[in-house]
Structures are given as C-alpha cells and as structure tokens.
Amino acid sequence: MTKNRLEAFSDGVLAIVITILVLELKIPHGTDFTALRPLLPVFLTYVLSFVYLAIYWNNHHHMLHTVHKVNGRILWANLHLLFWLSLIPFVTGWMGENHFAAEPTALYGVVLLMAAIAYTILRVEIVRHHGPDSILATAVGRDAKGKISILAYVTAIALAFVDQRISDALYIAVALMWLVPDRRIESRMQS
Amino acid sequence: MTKNRLEAFSDGVLAIVITILVLELKIPHGTDFTALRPLLPVFLTYVLSFVYLAIYWNNHHHMLHTVHKVNGRILWANLHLLFWLSLIPFVTGWMGENHFAAEPTALYGVVLLMAAIAYTILRVEIVRHHGPDSILATAVGRDAKGKISILAYVTAIALAFVDQRISDALYIAVALMWLVPDRRIESRMQS
Amino acid sequence: MTKNRLEAFSDGVLAIVITILVLELKIPHGTDFTALRPLLPVFLTYVLSFVYLAIYWNNHHHMLHTVHKVNGRILWANLHLLFWLSLIPFVTGWMGENHFAAEPTALYGVVLLMAAIAYTILRVEIVRHHGPDSILATAVGRDAKGKISILAYVTAIALAFVDQRISDALYIAVALMWLVPDRRIESRMQS
Amino acid sequence: MTKNRLEAFSDGVLAIVITILVLELKIPHGTDFTALRPLLPVFLTYVLSFVYLAIYWNNHHHMLHTVHKVNGRILWANLHLLFWLSLIPFVTGWMGENHFAAEPTALYGVVLLMAAIAYTILRVEIVRHHGPDSILATAVGRDAKGKISILAYVTAIALAFVDQRISDALYIAVALMWLVPDRRIESRMQS
C-alpha cells in the first residue's frame, strides 16, 4: 500500500511537470506559420524535455516494479528526485528562449545531472532495503548506462562554454540511449 | 499492476491537459456580457477540444480495459499519444484567438491527425502483444471510424487554406461521430 | 475497475481545478498588508469556489461509493459534470475581480446551475443503471437539497441584476446547506 | 475504498501544489548567470516550500496508513488541510519576491500555522473515529513535534516585524526537525 501511494504521487508530479512544460509554448500573435518560426527552438527543447521526463517515468516505473517495501529513506530519496525533475520546466524555458547561449545550456545539464544523481541515490536506497540479492540489485549490475549519462552531462556542462551545440548533441545522445526501455530488469523479471 | 500505473499516468496527463485548456480563457477586464463576446470563439474552441480529450479518455479507457499485459513498446506508444494530446492546449489557444485564419485551423488538424496516428500505433502494439484473437483485435475489426477520422483530418488540413469553416465543420463532425462510445468493444466484452 | 478509473480521472480533474483557482490570486507588488487589500474579494471568492468544489468532490465520492457498474452514458454524464466544474476558475476570477458587478455574479450562478443540472443527470443515469431499489435510489429519495440548490441558483442569477449582494448571500447559503455531508447515503449504507 | 480515494485526491492536490510552486520561478530575460541572481531568494523560498509540502505528504502518508475507516468529519478535516496547503504557492511567491519585508514573511508563517492547526484537527478526528487505543493515538502520544512547530510559527510571525531573518531561521529549523520521518508511527506499526 505504501508503495502504491509513492507511485501515485510520483505519477501525479511527473504528469503535471510534463504538462506544465507546454505552458512555455506561448501562443504567437501572428496567424501564419512564420509566426511559429521563433517558437521552433522552444518546441524542440520541449520535445527533448518531454522525452527525458518520459524516460524517467518509464525507468521509475520499472524500478518500482521490483520494490516490495518502502521506508522513510526511500520516500525522501524519491521526493529528492521529484524536486530536480520539477525544475525541468524552468530550465527548459530558459534554454528554449536562449538557444545559442552557453549558460542556459549548461544549467539544463546541471538539472539533468542532479536528477541522475538523485535517481542513483533512490536506486541505492531501494537496493539497500531489499538486499544485494534482490531483483533490482542483480538486474542493474554495474549500471553502465547510468554512469555514461552522468559522464555525458558533466561533459555537456563544461563544453557548453566552448560550443553549446556539442552539449545539445550530448543531451540528445543520452536521451536516445535511454529510449530503449530497461531490458535488464524486464528480462530478469520474466526469467 | 503495470497496467494500473499506465492508466494512472495517462489519466493524470489527460486530466491536466483538459484543465490547462481553460487557462486560455483569459478573464476579461470589462464587467458586462459584451466583454465576453471576444471570448466566444475561444470558448467554442475550448468546448471542441474538451470533447476531443474526453473522447480520447473514454476510448483509451475502453481499449485499456481489454489489456492484460504491458510491454515497453506499449508504454512508449502510450507516451507518444500523450505527447500529441499535450499539444492540444497550444493549438486550441492559437485557433481560438485567430478563428478566421487558415494556418491555426490547419495546425489544429495536424495535431488531431498525429494523435489519431499515435492512437492507432498504440492499438496495433496492444493487439500485437495480445494476439489476433484477443478481445480488442476482434472488437475493433477493420476500424472504420479510425480510418474515417484520419481521412477527415487530412481533408480538413488541406481545405483550411480554401475556407477554414469547412475544416471546423469536419472537426465537429468527427467529434460527433466518436461521441457514441465504442460499443464494439463494450458489446464483445459482455457477450 | 471501470469505476476506479472514473473516480481517478474525476479526482484528477477536481484536484487540478481546485488548485488552478489559486492562480487567480496574483502576487501583489507591494510588501505591506495594504497591498493585499485589493485581493480580499478575490480571496473570498476563492474560498467560496474551493468550498463548492470540495462539496462536489465529497458528494461525488459518496455517490460513486454506491455504484457497482458503469456504462457509456454514466461516463459521459460524468465528463459533462467535469466540463462545467472546469469553468469555475474562470467565473471565479471574473467575479473576484469585479465584485460589485451584476454580470460576473450572474455568470457564476449560471455555471453553478449547469453543474447542478449535470450532477442531477449523472445521478439519474446511475440510478437508471442500478435500478429503483438500489442504495442510491432509496437514499436520495426526493432530493430536496438538489432542488433547493437549483431554485436558489436561478433566483441568484435573476437577482444579480437587482442587487448582487443577494446573489452572493444565496451562493453562500447553498454552500452552507451542503457542507453537511450527504448523511442520507451514509446512513443507508451503514444500516 | 473511501480511504483510497481520500489519499488519491490528497496526492493529486499536493502534487499539483508542489508543481505550481515552480511557476513562480519566472524565466529571466538575460542569458548569463547574473540574470539568475535576482531569482535566488525566490529559488530558496521554493526549496523551503517544496520541503514543507514534502513533509506534509510524508506525514499525511504515515498517518493515513493507520486509518481503517473514514467519516464525513475526516473528509472535511482533510479538505480544510488541503485548503491551507493550496495557499502555499501564493505566500511563497510573495515572500520570494520581497525577501527583506516583514509582512510577507509573517503571512508565510500564518499559512504554515493554519496548516499545522488543520493537520492537528485532522489527527484529532482520526483518533476520535478510531478510539484512544488505536495505533495512531498511542503512536503520536503527546505530539511534542506538533506543539513545537505551532509555537515556532507563532514566534516567527511576531518576530517578522522585528527582524525577518529570525523568522526565516525558525521556518528552516522546523522543516529540519520534521525532515526525520515520523518514526513514532513507523516503529509502533512494526512492533
């Protein structure tokens, strides 16, 4: 029961964050398609953030699927993750409006980095509570994807001040890497 | 359980999208009913989009009712559908504010078209996962309604540049066609 | 299961509508309490609408508690109710900003009236689907409260053009009448 | 079942309130980090309110865990709590924008105080409904933390007019005190 409510609250926050994103797409005053052109970078940033939040929902869903019991540390680790995810609309909006600037691009990476760290903390707490032989512990293994993501975010933050297009490319690459659902857990659970 | 969370997340996103729509109804400064007159097209567009989102919730509800198991492809097909539905407030606002312009009317149709395609993909994935003899597969059959809708959206997008009232009429006609709940599934399930 | 999702979606929409209300409380620029004074009517209208939405959630909750099965008519009757409730933030904002004007006060009553009619339709559909001997049918009986409310709203709409304070008093009186939870159903269910 | 819907609605409202908070972080027009500097107090206030709402969700979660049955008084006590929590985005925004002013700091405390009182009322109603020997009643005991919080809020409201930094320190101290999850209930439930 505790787990159900954790899932329900996380679903609620993620559903709202993913929908609030679209409020950054301000309705243009013009009536032809040229009026939409300035919105294109905002829209592309929206798509990127939507995909990231969808990935988080998906992986969160898979991870929680393996959870049998919840304690206070897990509840707070989850709220900590939701905190960083709740900042995504803000950094999405700032990056979308200033698409060639280094600082918004770097800050976007900072929030992604903090969310990735928060997700790792949550996973560690769940594994600690369920033991090293639990489904999650054996399924995740060395967590190569998680480590690559964190490395990519750090690189993207640094390189934003060199050429922010490299950072954009890194953000897109990490998203594509995760778009494949976490088959590690899925396959373990079915075996 | 997996299915429950898919439903809960979809309900959350749909509930927020349907409610965010009303934020486009900006409170007028005047205090008499003439102050509401400029809001009338925005309100009518709001009603149309509310009905479309209600139809999606209703059909989604009926379709998921037949689902027993969920895989990664279904999760992503569902998120893809939610992405297009999340754009409805934006295109509703643009069309509501520019009710005699071709481009906003066409763009509204594009989002409806993409949502219809996304819904079809979701249905195909569910049928593929449950087999051609599943309730959903036999209930939907040739899916005449779905095909008519897509045809109507394509026509409406093209004719928006001739006379956008034809497009409006088509959007309303498709909504009316769907207002009847999907009796195909309901009747199969009860037999 | 169908009923669960109906409840979940209604809860979602009501939770969002009740929270969107507070967005009408625009943050003042001044830093002392006099800066809050112009917000007082907006705040009082907010409290009134919050109470109305809470009453609807409460009564909806009680009514759905008696429901065993759901059909398409009930789903649409429920969506129809949610439509009118979704307009409450708009009319609350207009009335809050123009607290001495007749038209916003009347329009507030119109939305309350339509919501009350929609609620009645929903109740009729549920009773029709469950039979005249169901818990809900016998518990509601002649539905005096519902009829008084509708009469009060109609009166309030008309009298808003005479003196809108009478209308305000009627809205408050109806809310107070409903603040008592629907003991009719509660007592029948426990017997 | 009644309890489930109470939890679901509360989760929905809390998820929305916690997410609406972030809308106060207006996207700056500048593109470098100096453009973010004026946002710092708003951000810190956002963090504080996020933590408070997370504490409420957490404690609400623990308290409801002990509940077996719900009556009308509990439903309304819960709605009363949600009312005060729904005002947190407003007072957060006012305090965040006027971080050195006494009145917004005091008003923030007033809303925290009212929420704490509402939470106490909810707890009293639940205990009354479940009896003095229920898990909750014995677990909470004298409720020292609740009493200290209320005392701290009252002090913070008064001292805001002397030096608002004292009030800020008190708000932070109370949050830190609660960050430890309510082990009283957890330990009783496991014994």
Image (cartoon, coloured by chain):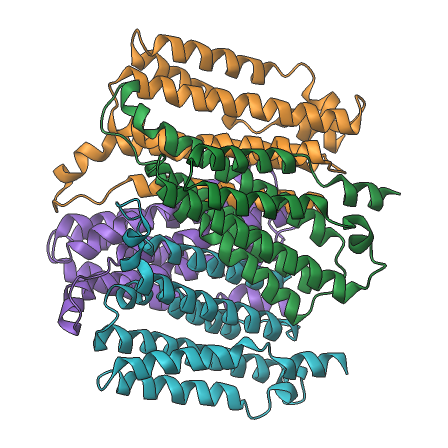
Chain colours: A cyan, B green, C orange, D purple
- Give the answer, above or below, for where B122 lies relative to C102: below
Q: Is residue C177 visible?
A: no
Depth order, front residue of C111/D112: C111
Depth order, front residue of A166/D69: A166
Image x and y of residue D111, in percent: 31, 47
Q: Is residue D165 left or right of residue B24?
A: left
Depth order, front residue of C24/B107: B107
Q: Residue at x 28, y 32 (%)?
A: C42
- Quarter of the image with the C terminus of chain D is bottom right
Image x and y of residue A28, in percent: 28, 48
Q: Residue at x 59, y 57 (%)?
A: B118
Name which quarter of the figure residue B95 lies in: top left
- Give the answer, above or below, for where A182 lies relative to C56: below
- Give the answer, above or below, for where D178 lies relative to C6: below
Count how many numbered circles sit on residues in the image.
Answer: 0
Q: Residue furthest front?
A: B162
Image x and y of residue D65, in percent: 60, 57
Name which quarter of the figure residue B125 lies in: bottom right
